[in-house]
Amino acid sequence: MQIPIFTDDAGWHGAQLKQAFKARGVDAVFVALQSCVLDMAGRHAQIQIPGCTGLPAAAFVRGIAGGTLQQVTTRLNVLHMLAMQGVKIYNDAKAIERTVDKAMTSFLLGRHGVATPATWVCESRQQAERIRQEAQAKRQALVIKPLFGSQGLGVRPLAFDAALPVPMQQLVDGVYYFQQLIKPPTASDQEPSHDYRVFVIHGQVVASMKRSGTAWLNNLAAGARATAFVANAAMMELALAAARAVNIDYCGVDIMQAQSGEYYVLEVNSIPAWKGLQGVTEQNIAQLLVDDFLGKLP
């Protein structure tokens, strides 16, 4: 059996997956979605995947390169069309779309009763100013994030008495995505600011970690430190509820505890990195992913 791993940068994660597939007697090949061809010249559409002869039984999505709206739409169309032709896509394109779009993620979490910060999304700067004024009246600090983005890039806090920066419209690419800033339990030298990553596969929590940052942002890509942590029952229940809300095979759920002690889901990641998590857990995450993936094939 030959399985394409869709990615434009295999790196450490790709190597881990390829080794895990090899352990199960499966040949995995790396393919960039942008190198695929949609051939609709004949009666039946064909999707040409470099390195693959005919349609594979399944494909593993490790990364989707950024680009213009047309380019990203075309790459997602490859996944959608493969699925329509009976190819198992892991995670599938619909799940990726639901989670890459932070507004849709927030909507689905709220719709399913999953605790998540209060969120507002708009395009108008006038409406954004109104949201800010209402937050100011409540002395409520906000966070502004790119609607599409990862690794904490472009995420910045807005104090309740701070004005919107003048060039903000360019920084957010025309869409304002505000979330209430969740204030964590008081940080100290012994217990710096932190949040949690809980990794879910097939409706089960398989690993978790604490991410401690030197500032308010706790992404490992921004310099935070990963430490071993066993998620408690409340966190596991919340992570599993988040995965069900977005209907996904596997995901990384980012959770923060508020000063009140309550837990909130900040984001759900459909193409999560796990290098930091692998360093603090005995679980072989790549093998768990591959085994779940292969277990879904007929």
Image: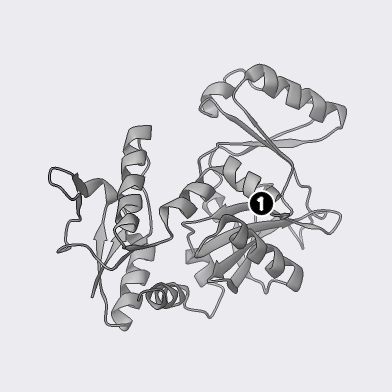
Q: In the picture shown, does residue 296 fall above or below 266?
A: below
Which quadrant is home to the N terminus?
A: bottom left
- How many numbered markers are drawn? 1
Q: Of the residues shown, which amino acid type is indicated by label 1?
A: Leu
User: On the image, which quarter does residue 293 sit in?
Assistant: bottom left
Instruction: Pick out the residue farthest to the front.
Output: 43
Q: Is residue 85 left or right of residue 148?
A: left
* Residue 110 visible in the current orientation: yes
Q: Position of residue 264 (x, y in %)?
A: 73, 54
In the depicted view, which residue is nearer to us: 201 or 77?
77
The residue that appears at 85% across and 32% down in the rendered structure is 139
Q: Quadrant of the C terminus?
A: bottom left
- Colour basis: one colour
Whether residue 24 sits left or right of residue 190 in the image: it is left
Give the structural element (helix, strand or loop) at label 1.
helix
Question: Residue shown at 39%/64% (left/top)?
Answer: 13
* The image quarter in which residue 50 lies: bottom left
Q: Is residue 220 above or below residue 249?
A: above
Q: Nearer the viewer, residue 246 or 281?
A: 246
Please state the horizontal and vertical placement of residue 30, each as a whole percent of the image.
26, 61
Side (left or right) of 51 relative to 133: left
Is residue 162 visible in the rendered image? The answer is no
**Foreground residue among 227 and 263:** 263
Percent position (x, y) of residue 21? Answer: 32, 76
Write down the residue under mark 1. 109
